[in-house]
Each structure stands twice: as C-alpha cells, then as structure tokens.
Image (tube, rainbow, N blue to C red):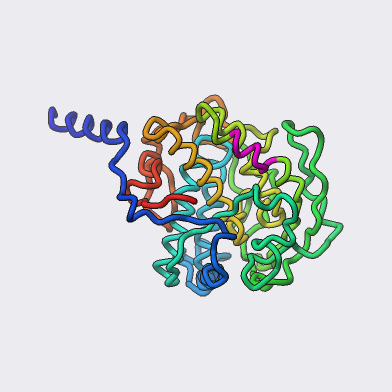
Amino acid sequence: MRLFHTLLLAAAVALAASPPRCHPNATQVRREWQELSPSERTDYIDALWCMRSRPSRLPNHQFPGVRDRLDDFVTTHINNTLRIHNNGLLLPWHRHFTWLWEQALRQECGYTGVQPYWNWALYMDDLWTSPLFDNSATSLSGNGVSNASTAEHPPLCPANLDGCLPPGHGGGCVTAGPFANWTIHLGPFTRDWVKSYGPLPPDPWHYNPRCLNRNFRPEALQTLNNQQRIDRMLHAPDMDAFLSVMDPGDATRIGSHGGGHATVGGAMLDVFASPHDPTFFLHHGMVDRVWTLWQEADFPQRWDALNGTAVIYNPPDAPWVTLHTVMDFGVLDSPRRVGEVMDTRSGRYCYAYT
C-alpha cells in the first residue's frame, strides 16, 4: 500500500513540475504561410490532397459518411465539439489535434515540412490578394462565389461588438485555385446544436458530399484579429485575461479564435465540422502560436496556466480543467492528459514558432 501511494505521489509531482525540454537545435520551427517558398507551399498543398487519397481508419458501418483520412479528423472534431470550445480545453485539445495532423502529413504522405500558420494581422488590408487566398497555385484558394441567399447567414451579432458584423462577400462554392474540387462529406451542422451538455446533431455521420464553400468577412478579421487584439493576448497577466480575448467562455461573445472562423465563413463557420476547410489547421496554428508566445514570455510559470471547464460555455456545475483532465482523440491517438500537451518543447513535442 505504501508503494502504491508513493507511485501516486510521484505521478502527481511529475505533472506539477514542468518537464525537461528538447534541445533548441532539435526544435522544428513552424512558419507563417508567407515565409514559405512557393515550393514549400506546394508541398503542403500536395500533402493535403494526399490525405484525401488515404483511406479512413473508422469502421464504415458506424461512420457511413467518412471516406478518407481527413474525414477521420473531421469526425474526431465533431465528436468532441461540445467539450473543446469556449472553455478550458480549447487551447490544449486543439494544440494536440493540430500536431496529430502535422504528424499524419509526414508519416502518411511524406511531407517534410512543418505545419504553417496564418498570422491574421498580416492580412488586414485585402484577403483576396494575399498569398494565402489569392487563388494562385500556391494558395489555399480564395473566397466562394457570390451567393446572396447564403452570404448573410448566419448573422453574427456578438455582445462584445457594437452591432452586427456585415454580411459576407461570397457564400458559394470555391471554384478556383488548388482546392476548387475539394469535396466535403459530413454536415453541415447549425449552431442550434451548440449547447452545454447537448447531444450531437441527429445522424452526424450521414454522407453528404458537396463543394467547399466560403463566405469571406474581412470585417471580422479587422475587428477581432488585428494586431491590437494579438498584443492584448500577449500581454495578458493571466489565462483568464488571455481567454477573454481569444475565446470568451459564453455563447454571447466572440474572440479571436471565432473571428478567424468567421472571416473565412462557410465550412469554417461550422463549429462541428470546420476541419473540412484547409484553412482550419493554419488558423489553429496561429491560435497555438499566440498561446505559445504567451507561455514563453514567463516560462515555466505559465506552462501550467489553465482556466475554464471541460464543457462548452463553462456551465457552473461542469468539472474544472486540470493537468489531469483526459482529452479524447478518437481514432487519431490514445487519450491524453492536459499535462502532456502544455509545452511545445517537451514530451512528444519539439517545435516553436517564428
């Protein structure tokens, strides 16, 4: 019995102290899309298409709508949506989810680069002509075609802004660039199903092939993802202040995390199935970058900083997130404790950001 308690104490101490870090010379550096050469961008785009050619690892009789490895990631996100947004798990869960995507690109598709990110502040002036969205062969394609019937939906009127964001400038299918023929398979799901302790939408694994749609709202980027907002997060005194800008824990406000999704719109604005859009992992690369820079500004004191519950919108009776909270990754990986993902340069991780 004494040995058992000793082992438990040792495990608790191991999680309570920051683990040893990988050597700086071994650290892989994630870069912004504009920092990649044209050939590096093409390599990333090719790896994304490779994931569409890889078979799903999910049983088709349980998940009839899945067709490929991207769908495995989308399905995992759908399954966890009500536990990983607007709460204390947004940052740690998506850090590991993005890392798993990066590893899959390398191990299954021969990708030799790193996961790039989308620095929101560099794209304030014109999304359409930016290297990320200019419809060139080295972009992630651009806006969807204009569709007046969908451009205004859903309306975005968060309580922390003065009025509503303007309607989008697209709404239809992406018809140019490398992802013009990017077919998505699951959803769409409305925000009516985004509730604390709510069930998943009915028949979430139904096969529903359709085009990738986008609905650019540059006003969302300019309002919610500008450099001033980024600076507020980087200078936040604690995690509560950080999350109040990045991802407020209630249903009435929108932060920089939601702002990136709202900027692209369409599939990216589907809370459940947003990984369908190739922009998703670059956006979450930036979310992770800002968090990483904030942690590094006062490391190791901030390595274990958490705030919020493990249920969307932080209901008062929900369990508080701790380093011991277990996160689910479905078919992608074994369950992981939050304490395993808190440092980008320890454990299974060895990466940093420009």
Q: Is residue 225 magenta?
A: yes
Q: State the residue in front, 295 or 82.
A: 295
Task: Inspect this view and state whether residue 140 appears.
Answer: yes
Which residue lies at the image location 55% right of the left edge and 49% below the top edge? 286
Quarter of the rendering containing residue 37 = bottom right
Task: Say whether residue 256 is left or right of residue 294.
Answer: right
Numbered circles on residues, count: 0
Q: State the residue in front, 55 or 147.
A: 147
Q: Residue furthest right?
A: 148
Q: Main secondary structure of the magenta part?
A: helix
Task: Say whether residue 278 is left or right of residue 27.
Answer: right
Q: Position of residue 241 (x, y in %)?
A: 56, 28
Which residue lies at the image location 36% right of the left edge and 52% below the top edge? 350
Q: Position of residue 227 (x, y in %)?
A: 64, 41
Q: Is residue 288 magenta?
A: no
Quarter of the rendering containing residue 133 = bottom right
Vertical relation: 209 (above or below) 17: below
Q: Position of residue 128 (x, y in %)?
A: 74, 60
Quadrant of image for the N terminus: top left
Q: State the residue in front, 236 or 192.
A: 236
Q: Position of residue 18 (x, y in %)?
A: 32, 36
Which residue lies at the image location 65% right of the left edge and 51% below the top edge? 122
Task: Say whether residue 86 is left or right of residue 13.
Answer: right
Q: Which residues are magenta?
A: 224-232
Task: Inspect this view and state whether residue 281 appears.
Answer: no
Vertical relation: 190 (above or below) 302: below
Task: Say whether residue 65 is left or right of residue 59.
Answer: right
